[in-house]
Image: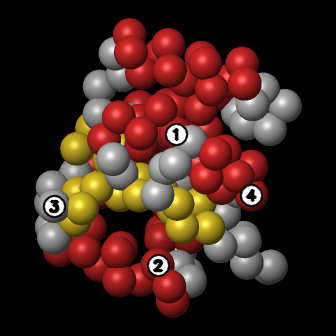
Amino acid sequence: MKHYLFDTNAISLAFDNALPEKWVRPWKEVRMGNGRLLLFEPLVSETYYKNIPKYGKKASKDKIYWLKSLPKTKIHQIDDNDAINAGDIKVQYSRKLSLVDCFLLAVAKANSAKVFTTDPSVRDTARDMNINIDYLPLPKT
């Protein structure tokens, strides 16, 4: 089964039903249980707080619970290896990436997951790390 990790902006686009056409198929696979969505709690937290301005607290929380309830969703439990690997990524790419981005890449690497991102720094680092990446720039609004 394919493993997918969507970054915060990609998840937010999914919440808005505004995913780029290129990402609709993998998102459908996730929603139908034919692909495994990987989440981890720092990503959940970032997704929650970044969606509050648009949806408010209750609706953002409800969207997070819906995301977690999708078939085959796996909540990856961060362990020492993930923390050390994310720390190593942060040291090497500190000016480019947030700590959540570093965890995203560490979790993707550990699970051989494909990452969907709108962040060019995540794209570039993923390529350096030989992580399967699908990048599209954030649509202009």
Amino acid under disc 4 = Pro
| Residue 19 seen in render | yes
Callout 3: SS: loop
Q: In terms of sequence position, does the residue under pointer 1 or pointer 4 come before the other?
A: 1
Give the alpha-carbon distance from disc 4 to disc 2, as whole Å.
17 Å
Left or right: 15 in relation to 138:
left
Label pair 1/3, CB-CB below 8 angstroms: no
Residue highlighted by disc 2: 23
First in residue order: circle 2 vs circle 3: 3
Residue that carries the numbered disc 1 in the rendered image: 105
Could you tell me residue 89's position as x and y percent?
Answer: 63, 26
Q: Which residue is mark 4?
A: 120
In the image, is residue 2 above or below residue 74?
Answer: below
Q: Decide: marks 2, 3 in contact (CB < 8 A)?
A: no
Distance from Cα at disc 2 to Cα at disc 3: 17 Å
Of callouts 3 and 4, which one flags the residue occurring earlier in the amino acid sequence?
Answer: 3
Q: Point out residue 110 in the picture as x, y percentages from the top left corner.
A: 35, 34
Q: Position of residue 10 (x, y in %)?
A: 55, 63
Q: Nearer the viewer, mark 4 or mark 2?
A: 4
Residue drawn at 78 percent across, 26 percent down: 94
Residue 1's tag is 3
The secondary element bearing badge 4 is classed as helix
How many other residues sit within 10 Å of disc 3, few (<14), some (14-19) or many (≥20)? few
Q: Residue furthest bottom?
A: 21
**Which kind of residue does numbered mark 2 sit on?**
Trp
Q: What kind of element bears circle 1? A: helix
Picture layout, residue 50 above or below residue 34: above
Q: CA distance from mark 2 to mark 1?
A: 19 Å
Tell me how far mark 1 sits from mark 4, CA to CA.
13 Å
Rounded to the nearest angstrom, the CA distance separating label 3 from label 4 is: 27 Å
Display coloring: secondary structure
Please give the label number shown on residue 4.
Answer: none
